[in-house]
Image (cartoon, grey):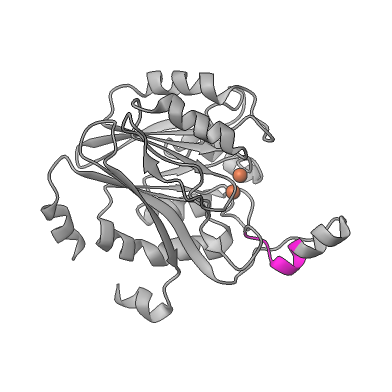
Amino acid sequence: MAEAEAAEARPPSDVSILFVGDLVGGNGRRTLLDCLPILRERYAPRFVVVNGENVAGGLGITPKIADELFAAGVDAITLGNHTYHRREIYPYLDAQPRILRPANFLRSQPGHGFCVVENDGQRLGVVNLSGNLYLRAGRSAFTEVEVALRELGAVDHVLVDMHAEATSEKVGMGWHLDGRVTAVVGTHTHVPTADARVLPGGTAYITDVGMTGPRGGVIGVKRDQAIQALLTQMPTRFETSEEDPWLMGVIIRCSRPLRADSIEQVLMPRPLPAEAAVS
Ligand SMILES: [Fe+2]
Ligand SMILES: [Fe+2]
């Protein structure tokens, strides 16, 4: 079904949100760009949000890459523990409202942790959080999310990216926000989990959506280098793998404000050049 027809067929209040897990390197960026036209036709998402914390060569993001993602129709970019790897992004984080670093970083750190994007009269609030276990975040995700939700103001939907190592913190955040936001999606581990569901209060939840990039590596790194580092326990040069690129994300469908009807995993190999060209 063409995108326009898909948009016409759904009820006016029907909103779907495509969230895509950590883009890893140029491979992840190109995989997203090749998959997006197919996913737009398949799901007609009203909003597209991606986590971009690894998109610049595996660590961080640059203004040029962020601009390229926005030009491709991405509505908002979330980040995580690799936010500040590239210095050139610091002023951009303050100037561009639609790129987020975790809201529970220190207030003194560049950037901001939430935004509102509007498409076809629907307002989506996006909140980025960092877990506090095994990651450096200056303030509690659980207290700072309250501030972010209050300051978002009137919105139709809220998507929270909980970027965290510990499954306990992510599951806890899902329950904490159940019935108050549209979706809580986990990122950071680069491995998708099998627990996508709508919680009883109506919040879509998944512990980790996975990553977008080379499935043939070790969470994005060339596997020989990763195995060498694990074997020798010595500093090893890490490069982004190019093998077996996949897009990993979720599609969240909604027909009432701040509640989800469904959450479905999207696990898709990068299309071959001929497939990408015809879509
Ligand atoms: Fe990541
Ligand atoms: Fe991360």
* Residue most extreme to the bottom: 274
Question: Which of the 4 quarters of the picture holds residue 5?
Answer: bottom left
Question: Is 113 part of what is drawn in magenta?
Answer: no
Residue 210 horizontal/vertical position (percent): 52, 52
Q: Residue at x 40, y 23 (%)?
A: 149
Residue 212 can be seen, yes or no: yes
Q: Residue at x 26, y 41 (%)?
A: 261
Residue 277 horizontal/vertical position (percent): 34, 76
| Image quadrant where one finds the C terminus | bottom left
Q: Is residue 266 left or right of residue 103?
A: left
Residue 113 can be seen, yes or no: no
Q: Is residue 192 above or below residue 15?
A: below
Q: Which residues are magenta?
A: 220-226
Q: Is residue 214 left or right of residue 205?
A: right
Residue 9 horizontal/vertical position (percent): 12, 54
| Image quadrant where one finds the N terminus | bottom left
As rendered, which of 240 and 70 lies closer to the eye?
A: 240
Question: Which of the 4 quarters of the picture holds residue 237?
Answer: bottom right
Q: Is residue 268 left or right of residue 27?
A: left
Q: Residue at x 29, y 31 (%)?
A: 258
Q: Residue at x 61, y 24 (%)?
A: 106
Q: How many labels sit on residues?
A: 0
Q: Is residue 126 above or below residue 89?
A: above
Question: Is 221 part of what is drawn in magenta?
Answer: yes
Question: Which of the 4 quarters of the picture holds residue 134?
Answer: top right
Residue 253 horizontal/vertical position (percent): 27, 45
Q: Is residue 232 above or below residue 82?
A: below
